[in-house]
Image (spheres, rainbow, N blue to C red):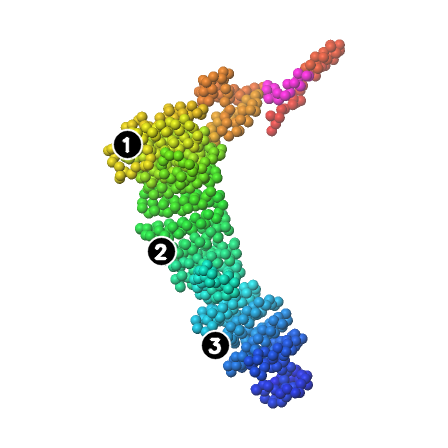
Amino acid sequence: MALLRCCFEPPELPEFFDSFVQKCTDPSCCCGCCSALRPRYKRLVDNIFPVNPEDGLVKSNMEKLTFYSLSSPDKLDRIGEYLYQKATKDINRKRYKLAEIAMEAMDLLLQACHAQTTLNLFVESFLRMVQKLLEDNNPNLKIMATNSFVKFANINEDTPSYHRRYDFFISKFSSMCHSEGKDLRDSLRLAGIKGLQGVIRKTVSDDLVENIWAAQHMEKIVPSLLFNMQFCVNVMFVKKNLLASGDLTPVEDATNVTPPALAEEVLRELVGRASFGHIRSVLKPLLTHLDRHELWVPNTFAIHTFRIVMISIQPQYSYTVVETLMQHLDNNFKSSPKTRTSLAVVLSKIIAIAAGESVGPSALDIINNLLTHLRTSVSTTTEITAEESQYQEALINALGEFANHHPDYQKIEIMLFIMNTVPDPSKKSKGDQMLQNILLKSLLKVGTQYSTVSFEKAFPASFLQPLLKMARAPHDPTRLIVMQIFQALLDRHQNDQVLSSVSVKQYPALSQEPPSRSDIIFTHKHGAHIMQALIDSMALSERVDALSASYNTAALLIVEMSSSETVQEFLLFILGIQEVANTVETLGAVHKCNLHAISIALLVLISRVSGINNLLDYAQKIVDARREEATYFLPPLLESKKVASKSLNLSLPHLAIDKLALGECLQNAGMDAQRLNTGAPYTLNQTDHPGHRHSWVESVSSHLTQRNSSADLTVYNGDVDSVSSSPGVCKKILAPEFNFDAMKRALAEPTEAAKREQRERQMQIVRTFREGEFDDLVRRTEPKHDLIQNRLNELFNSLAVERQISQSDSKVAQLQGSSEKPIYETNFPELFYY
């Protein structure tokens, strides 16, 4: 038996009699006898190899081997081991054709027997053969081995092998992705990318096998894919040009699979399969590769790569990419401005994709990080260079792109959050002013993305008050940005460009619609504060651009909020601008002329938008008079450097806007002019206009504070309570005569006598409840609807008097005695229940 042990094992002796004809073809066989001494599976394997290797696999014998493997699955592992031994000998002897035939046989057996329970043992031999072919320097063997591995990766195994490792394959396929040889370079790179794709598919879907997300694996896979994708952008542009010129058809483009395209597909698949805990494992080597190869400048490839990541990643994890990129920007704060600018541009390109999935704290967290980078950029530089300015603009654009993809209510929260981070305007240092401008530019970027519907929602009090404070800042660029913010939020009908220049001409392209009730209430409540801030801003600087910005804001305010209820307030505002020009001595002559020009331009504008012809005629008369005597009181605005102040005559009161004339114009148009006649124009540096109309909220609050804490229990006035509950409506007790004086007294505040009478009445009610008899209190608190019932009872009692007289005296006495009820039978009204 020792001589036979080289060809078969003792359990295989029953196969000895299967064949006596064929000769042993194994050169290492020491028996030298007939083929009957070899096991059947070895003879079947030997028969698939042709005499001439160029003829390829013997198909008929391969079918016999496949049938034998299916009928005897216990022999499958031995068949695989024997094929591996033969392929190893052929590779060592440089007989590559026979090695390819062995690999092909392995593939066919794997496809036919993948459902067998003993497949794991066969797979071990299969992977050893693939590894053997990959280790050889022959590129054809490497490509063939890779294709075989890809076929194996597409097979779903029922029972995973926990001890199987793919470290060698990851390393080998990654090295193939970097092939630089002249022969079959693209084919080897394609094979390497396909091999990595096979490893990803084989391991990422099963948590029990080797962890593909480990750092040592991702640091090989991701850079290999990016190395091939670096040419993708250039290839993409070339293809676009070829398609545009007609030299390349879409069909030809679809059939040619290039390494960059395949690498991009694999990267998409890898990112798409990553969970929340694994996405950083992909991003870290990606950022490292971009840093080492200096691919941030220019940033075309970086933008392309991160867009692929953002589109492929699961939507709920997109915020992680933005957060990781911001952390990388933190780590590169000492890098060149160009590198940081490129990083910020990449962030601005991808942040919009993540915005749709960011809500609540995550959205504000991104905004806070962007603002932190802006503050760091301002604080670390003494002078803003052109490159640093580009970096800041890139961050602001990123913030705007992020806010643009949020709903309007979140945009308001973002603007409020930014406003709270702006330094106080009282800080006049250069660094604080630079930071104010940068943060206000960020706020402006968000404001331009906001679509205003209601001014009450666009300007909450917590946002409007600090914004008005910044409108009075001493720094001109700061006020300009604040005016641009107001214009972005006020302009609902795209009139910004139409009203950008101060003019008394008509605006044919002006778009307007009547304001809503909520807008009118907002004007009554906050309009005076806004107009006061505009007057203060106009008086701070004589620069033409600053005055034009203030005029643009005021004009938009008039166009958007003009109505019969607000026109008097706007006229007082115009008179206030003229009053500042006439009374403030610190202003220059050119500055005063420009304020007069702004006031008449606003008067003409409000006359046209409100449709008051009398007011328009009056404004036109003033314009004509100024054209004859003082054209410098009309637009366009004057520049102090181009005009001599001594040549300007400011003492022309007959050319000024007259308050009484404005009131007459309103009265002739059938409108109320009391507010205009009794109110004082706006003045400079006034925190709150004393004569401005308070909001209905304040009216109701003051009315409620004037009401008594105790009411008269005998009288119930349901109309008073109903009216008092309506916003803005206060019930007044009118005098008997309805003349002008009586109505004027009714509208006035309560006199001291009325207040004293009210206090005495209240004290009388208190004394009544403290000192009065209980029966009296019960009588006074009885419901009034019982009065009819009492009258009916008295009527019925009077009809029964005759019967009561005929009765005996004893019964009369008894009835008189029974009419007095004991105290314990007295019924308590509900008012005294506890």
Q: Estimate how packed mark 2 is, as few (under 14), some (14 to 19) or many (20 or more) residues with alpha carbons within 10 Å.
A: many
Q: What's the residue at 64%, 18% (across, down)?
A: 787
Q: CA distance from mark 3 to mark 2?
A: 46 Å
- Circles 2, 1 touching at the beta carbon (< 8 Å): no
Give the amino acid type for the residue marked by disc 3 in the picture: Asn
Q: Which of disc 1 and disc 2 is earlier in sequence?
A: 2
Task: Pick out the residue farthest to the left.
Answer: 646
Where's residue 783, x and y in %?
A: 62, 22
Q: In the picture, residue 61 is in which quadrant?
A: bottom right
Q: Label 1, on which residue? A: 585
Give the amino acid type for the residue marked by disc 2 in the picture: Pro
Q: What's the residue at 43%, 45% (across, down)?
A: 446
Q: Which residues are magenta?
A: 775-793
Q: Is residue 98 above or below residue 388?
A: below
Q: Label 2, on which residue? A: 337
Q: Is residue 388 above or below residue 797?
A: below
Q: Which of disc 2 and disc 3 is earlier in sequence?
A: 3
Q: Which of disc 1 and disc 3 is earlier in sequence?
A: 3
